[in-house]
């Protein structure tokens, strides 16, 4: 699978600020006159939005395999309906979460076999890898505190601190395995400082 130049993802634990930063980076490219869309997983399409509601509703008791397949279902739709057409139209795509989230949450945190994830990925998304992934890294308790302040409480926010630490460490493991693609950004500082770090990486890597 090859990295696709016009494709960027943001990853991180709850409350890491990736949605804000994804939108800011889209604004940066737009003001430079480039075509860009910012999108989100799960979601990004009408069907994906419905799947998102199913996945995040706190009252749903969901089997880990059901959860995994719903994330892949959302991605199958998103890749074909939104991401491929945009890239073919020379539009930069910035997504708030992608495959690394599945590896971190369903793989490292829920404990589903990484080989199964990789087989599903081959089916759902055989040839699309972000050119750059920004991993906004943050202490788990700090992230959950930020989200509680914003009154966000979905099915994942109700998980234990240990679960979220497995997610964080999973992301860091992915980053250590693919340092060229995944750039770890300290998300504990102000949003402006985080943006500066991101733009610095873009200026170094985007020729
Ligand atoms: P968000 O609130 O950051 O948009 O993400 C929705 C939740 O879905 C978040 O708790 C992470 C989780 N998630 C997974 O567990 N697996 C995935 O593949 C994706 C894309 C998200």
Image (cartoon, rainbow, N blue to C red):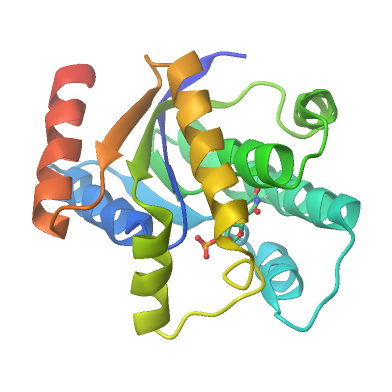
Please name the residue shown 55% across and 13% down the image: 2
Camera-nearest residue between 142 and 35:
142
Q: Is residue 46 above or below residue 24?
A: below
- Can see residue 201? yes
Please name the residue shown 10% across and 42% down the image: 196
Camera-nearest residue between 35 and 205:
205
In the image, is 56 to the left or to the right of 175? right
Q: Is residue 14 above or below residue 88?
A: below
Quadrant of residue 154 in the image?
bottom right
Total residue callouts: 0
- Can see residue 84? no
Q: Quadrant of ligand 1?
A: bottom right
In the image, is 45 to the left or to the right of 133? right
Please name the residue shown 53% across and 48% down the image: 165
**Residue 118 x, y percent position in the rendering:** 76, 25
**Residue 138 x, y percent position in the rendering:** 34, 49
Q: Is residue 60 above or below residue 77?
A: below
Q: Quadrant of the N terminus?
A: top right
**Residue 5 x, y percent position in the rendering:** 39, 22
Please name the residue shown 84% across and 49% down the image: 69
Q: Quadrant of the C terminus?
A: top left
**Residue 129 x, y percent position in the rendering:** 54, 25
């Amino acid at each position: 699978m090859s990295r696709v130049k016009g494709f960027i993802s943001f990853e991180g634990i709850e409350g890491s600020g990736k949605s804000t930063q994804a939108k800011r980076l889209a604004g940066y490219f737009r003001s430079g006159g480039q075509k860009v869309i910012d999108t989100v997983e799960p979601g990004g399409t009408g069907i994906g939005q419905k799947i998102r509601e199913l996945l995040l509703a706190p009252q749903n008791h969901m089997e880990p395999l059901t959860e995994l397949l719903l994330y892949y279902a959302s991605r199958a739709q998103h890749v074909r309906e939104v991401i491929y057409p945009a890239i073919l139209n020379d539009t930069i795509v910035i997504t708030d979460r992608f495959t690394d989230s599945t590896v971190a949450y369903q793989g490292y945190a829920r404990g589903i076999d990484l080989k199964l994830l990789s087989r599903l990925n081959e089916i759902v998304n055989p040839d699309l890898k972000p050119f750059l992934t920004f991993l906004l890294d943050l202490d788990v308790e700090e992230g959950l505190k930020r989200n509680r302040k914003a009154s966000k409480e979905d099915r994942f926010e109700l998980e234990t601190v240990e679960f979220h630490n497995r997610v964080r460490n999973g992301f860091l493991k992915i980053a250590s395995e693919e340092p060229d693609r995944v750039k770890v950004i300290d998300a504990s500082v102000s949003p402006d400082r985080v943006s500066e770090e991101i733009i610095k990486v873009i200026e170094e890597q985007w020729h």
